């Protein structure tokens, strides 16, 4: 079956002219790409549009993929540059640690969250919301490490950092995430501990 | 041993599997014997498990279809390495090196090298010009920029610049002509 083909095999076939097979790569990586972008943009519509552009860019530049890294690592590099371009266009500060706008949105949601819908919110939703409260760099780092199946070396390549720096930044990002969770989701964390 | 490293960093390394076997067994002992380490370990492990259990988000159902419709309008672009002519890069390098070398030789030829104190005359010695005796104030800039050689050199530089610009614009034109 097509779905059992490796990324490299698929790319070779695309470069030979089999355009339709690119759909397998899209299906394989759309969730990773969309999650990364959504955590960068905090807007579902923007995230979907940017993710679509990323796949188009990746398709057009496929001949530049040399195969000296995983396709996912190369693709996440495209994700990162596209997201940074998007943020620059929106004149957002990519280095800010606290996304105040998101924090405010979350605080507004929290009132309803605590009162009505605790049971409906899953543990996953809580983690995802807490990650979205981090800076784009921190949330990307955590997503790449936990969900993107990328090693420290590969994350370093994507983010243009040394592996040791990635490790230190990852420690700090998780520390900040823990703080955010304690601040915004203390009730839910207690509930989880009691389960 | 890195005992000075903060407890949290060492515990994260242990949880992520980044520490050496020696460090690993040292941390295992600390977790088993020290209540503070045990508490911190449980706390960090909980965060780690939460992060591992977080789910990826899914785009809309039409996402793949949208992407495939979009790429239907494009072709895979040729690899960058296939259309970047290394000779152009080398040409640009040679152009700048020539400019720098030309300026360097010209500036050196304008210096007055007879400066510096004369010491013992027992043998040949290297005399570097002192800053005061470089003779920079004596350079005739008007003469320099009126010299035929300098004008010829500047003309060559300008012509080469125009040629590079023309090549770049030609390449852009060809690329846009190839686009569907």
Image (cartoon, grey):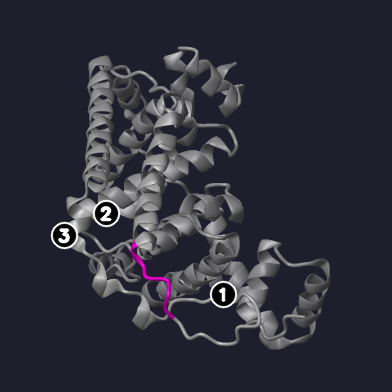
**Picture coordinates of residue A107, whole percent (x, y):** 26, 70
Confirm whether the magenta stretch covers residue B34.
no
SS under mark 2: helix
| Residue under label 1 | B126
Badges 1 and 3: C-beta atoms under 8 Å apart? Answer: no
Q: Mark 2, residues whose alpha carbon is within 10 Å: few (<14), some, or many (≥20)?
A: some
Using residue B151 as the reference point, say whether residue A160 is left or right of it: right
User: Which residue is labeled 3 in the image?
Assistant: B142
- Marks 1/3 same chain: yes
Quarter of the picture holding the C terminus of chain A: bottom right
Mark 3 or mark 2, whichever is nearer to me: 3
Q: Residues in magenta?
A: B110-115
Q: Is residue B74 above or below residue A143?
A: above
Numbered disc in front, either 2 or 1: 1
Using the image, name the chain to which the residue with label 2 belongs: A
Q: From what the image shows, is residue B117 above or below residue A23? A: below
Disc 2 designates what residue? A87
In percent of width and height, residue A184 lies at 36, 73
- Pointers 2 and 1 in contact (C-beta within 8 Å): no
Front residue (pair B118, A87): B118
Sequence-first disc among 1 and 3: 1
Query: Residue A43: x, y in percent?
Result: 26, 50
Q: CA distance from mark 1 to mark 3?
A: 32 Å
Against A49, is A170 above or below?
Answer: below
Q: Residue at x 60, y 26 (%)?
A: A6
Q: Secondary structure at mark 1?
A: loop
What is the tally of numbered marks visible in this picture?
Answer: 3
Residue drawn at the location 38% of the way across and 23% of the way down: B77
Q: Which quadrant of the view contains residue B58? A: top left
């Amino acid at each position: 079956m097509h779905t059992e083909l490796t990324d490299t095999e698929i790319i070779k076939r695309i470069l030979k002219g089999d355009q339709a097979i690119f759909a397998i790569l899209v299906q394989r990586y759309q969730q990773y790409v969309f999650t990364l972008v959504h955590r960068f943009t905090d807007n579902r519509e923007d995230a979907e549009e940017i993710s679509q552009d990323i796949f188009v860019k990746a398709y057009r530049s496929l001949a530049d993929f040399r195969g000296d890294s995983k396709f996912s690592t190369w693709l996440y590099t495209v994700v990162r540059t596209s997201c940074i371009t998007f943020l620059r266009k929106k004149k957002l500060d990519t280095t800010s640690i606290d996304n105040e706008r998101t924090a405010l949105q979350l605080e507004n949601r929290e009132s309803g969250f605590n009162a009505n819908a605790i049971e409906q919110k899953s543990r996953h939703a809580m983690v995802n919301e807490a990650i979205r409260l981090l800076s784009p760099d921190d949330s990307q780092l955590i997503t790449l490490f936990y969900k993107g199946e990328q090693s420290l070396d590969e994350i370093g390549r994507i983010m243009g950092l040394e592996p040791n720096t990635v490790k230190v930044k990852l420690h700090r990002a998780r520390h900040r995430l823990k703080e955010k969770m304690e601040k915004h989701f203390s009730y839910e964390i207690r509930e989880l501990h009691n389960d | 041993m890195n005992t000075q490293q903060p407890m949290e960093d060492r515990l994260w390394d242990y949880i992520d599997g980044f520490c050496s076997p020696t460090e690993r067994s040292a941390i295992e002992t600390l977790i088993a014997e020290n209540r503070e380490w045990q508490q911190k370990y449980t706390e960090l492990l909980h965060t780690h498990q939460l992060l591992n259990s977080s789910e990826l988000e899914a785009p809309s159902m039409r996402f793949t279809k949208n992407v495939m419709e979009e790429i239907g309008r494009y072709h895979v672009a040729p690899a960058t390495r296939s259309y970047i002519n290394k000779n152009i890069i080398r040409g640009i390098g040679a152009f700048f090196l020539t400019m720098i070398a030309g300026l360097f030789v010209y500036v050196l030829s304008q210096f007055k090298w007879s400066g510096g104190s004369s010491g013992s005359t027992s043998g040949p010695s290297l005399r570097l010009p002192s800053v005061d005796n470089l003779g920079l104030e004596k350079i005739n800039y008007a003469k320099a920029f009126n010299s035929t050689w300098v004008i010829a050199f500047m003309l060559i530089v300008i012509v080469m610049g125009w040629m590079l610009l023309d090549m770049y614009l030609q390449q852009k034109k060809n690329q846009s002509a190839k686009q569907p």
